[in-house]
Amino acid sequence: MIYTMLTALSGISAAQNITVRAGATQLLYDRRYYPAIYGEGVAPIVPTLGMKIGWRDYSDSPYAFICNHPEYGIAFQMDCLGDATAIEGPGVGNIYCLYGYFDRPLLKTNRLSLGYSAGFGLGCCFSKLYDPVSNPKNLIFSTPVNSRIRFGLEAQYRFSKRGYTGLGFYFNHSSNGDVNYPNRGYNGYELALLLGLKEPESERAIPERRDDCFKRHFQFDIQASAGVVSNEDYFYYCEETLGGGDNMHYPKFAFQADCLYKYCHTHATGLGFDLSVTTFCEQIAEYDGRDDIYDPVSVGLSIIHEMCYRDLTLTMGVGRYIHHNDGIARWQKVYQIVHFRYHFPDLADTFVGLTLKAHKFMNAESVQLCIGKRF
């Protein structure tokens, strides 16, 4: 029945490939909030359902050949957290995700393939959100819309001309990037069974790879970014003294300058300089009770690596502060930074995108919109 439905859906849609997925996610235990929701030492396993609609890149672009003709498209997923019974209060509601994905095969034969899958988009939780009166134990989500990051490995076996099955193992993360508190976020490892339909390569006239005349070179990026964050100290100050947290929102700004060496079409590595401005240092000092004087400007240096596909780039970096005393993430010396950018080569190689900054490889500091230029 499922295979018949997939065949019908494939014929109606314009997509080359359609995949349905069913699995389970093991939430990563965090003693900061799970005991209050599910009990001491308990991190639930929740069912997941999803679908991907995608296309493979069969063009003569050098990117298509380098990445072994990857698949890209849109995906939907439901994480059924609402099925996990809470020991007190409503618990946490289901997460409904919509995201773009990029699947690249690393090893491939006529019937078998192994590769990775990456996705970024939105995760929406419309019920059982944090409420200081009706649901104070849910410190995971306080906003209905959050970012969604997904990365995993997929093994696939083609059992017919179009049909395939397989297994996927993924890491999922959802968070609002500290726009609103509480925001402990959702983290989990997912194991899923895959069943789908794919257009056979034999039905495609794949062009020969053309000479792209690539030359190694240095590239320079500058970007400015801005976002909105909440004052965590003020939220918990209100919770302790007034019986309920209160979010006060402030702008946060950053400037980034990178120098990278591009050694192939899809990869570049280099160094980054970043400067960020926290506009609410006085408010942090007012409510944290430490009598410290904070500096709104933080400066850091980072090692960064960029992966790109056509005009879309993903840059990840690990940095160390050379000056940091803004009151956020006290005593932290190391930070992580991620850029998602879309470039416009015909517009003086400008780009727009999103920037995520975090500490401890898990605690988001801010999510910002960015604009910049490549030289």
Image (spheres, rainbow, N blue to C red):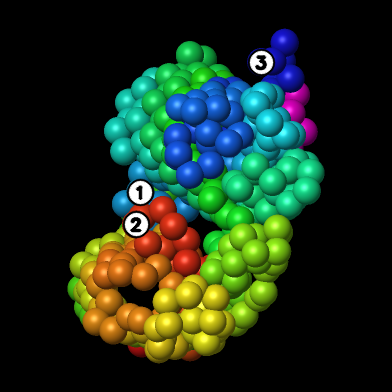
Amino acid of disc 1: Cys
**Helix, strand, or loop for circle 1?**
loop
Q: Residues within 10 Å of mark 1 (few under 14, many from 20)?
A: some
Q: Residue at x 40, y 83 (%)?
A: 292
Q: Provide residue 194's location: percent of width, then percent of height.
A: 53, 23
* Comes first in the chain, label 2 or label 3: 3
Q: Which residue is mark 1?
A: 67
Can residue 89 be seen by looking at this rendering? yes
User: Where 83 sits versus 240, above or below?
Assistant: above
Can residue 214 be seen by looking at this rendering? no
User: Where residue 3 is drawn, which disc sits there?
Assistant: 3
Amino acid of disc 2: Lys
Q: Magenta span: helix, strand or loop, mainly?
A: helix
Q: Which residue is mark 2?
A: 360
**Helix, strand, or loop for circle 3?**
helix
User: Where 273 sits versus 115, above or below?
Assistant: below
